[in-house]
Image (spheres, rainbow, N blue to C red):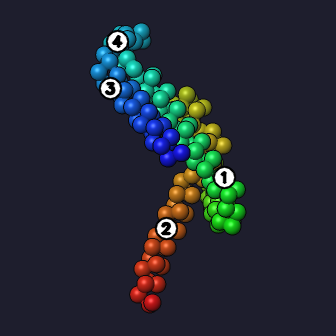
Amino acid sequence: MNKLIRIILIVLFSVSALIILFYFAGGKNTIELAASGRIETYPKFTNVLIVWAYILTGLAVGLTIVFPVIQMVTNPKNAKKGLMGILALVVILGIAYLFASDEALGIRNLELAAKYDVPSTLKYAGMMINSIYILAVIAIVSMVYSEVAKVFK
């Protein structure tokens, strides 16, 4: 099994290196923009690189989901700790959602306002920003606590 994983990693690395080589050394495409008459150039293999990045991201996300599930099935005692962490994250996201605002930004450009001044998008963005603040405070407090606890031991 370990040998199989090593072979898969070597193949993924080789394909990645080959695609990056093609991206940088594969020449350029030129395109004339109709609206401005400007000529732009971009690497020929840009789309291949982007698709490969999507494939690698999907693989990473899939394995990130599958391996913890396998771990929970094989070791149910430790699954409780993992589920508590997920539950804590859901609670933090819920609190962040409650404090998020969906108030309009007042963008004057109608195109941008239609795209970005949407209440649900604003609420989601606010939730993410608030959750980062909450998690940062938790991280700082836990670092300070661990250092202070070491002093009194």
Answer few, some or many: residues within 10 Å of disc 1's Cα (few below 14, many 20 plus, some between 14 and 19).
few
Q: Is residue 123 left or right of residue 35?
A: right
3 or 2: mark nearer the eye = 3
Answer few, some or many: residues within 10 Å of disc 2's Cα (few below 14, many 20 plus, some between 14 and 19).
few
Q: Amino acid at mark 2?
A: Ala
Query: Label 3: which residue?
Result: 21
Query: Label 2: which residue?
Result: 139
Compared to residue 38, the image places residue 56 above or below, namely below
Query: Label 4: which residue?
Result: 30
- How far apart are the two marked residues, 1 and 3, measured between alpha carbons? 36 Å
Of callouts 1 and 3, which one flags the residue occurring earlier in the amino acid sequence?
3
Query: Label 1: which residue?
Result: 69
- How far apart are the two marked residues, 3 and 2, measured between alpha carbons? 40 Å
1 or 4: mark nearer the eye = 1
Q: Nearer the viewer, residue 35 or 73?
A: 73
Looking at the rendered structure, the secondary structure element under dot 4 is strand
Instruction: Report the residue at 68% width, 58% height from top.
Output: 74
Q: Amino acid at mark 3?
A: Leu
User: Where does residue 76 sit, x and y in percent of width and height?
Assistant: 70, 63
Of callouts 3 and 2, which one flags the residue occurring earlier in the amino acid sequence?
3
- How far apart are the two marked residues, 2 and 4, measured between alpha carbons? 48 Å
Looking at the rendered structure, the secondary structure element under dot 2 is helix
Query: Looking at the rendering, in which quadrant would you find the C terminus?
Result: bottom left
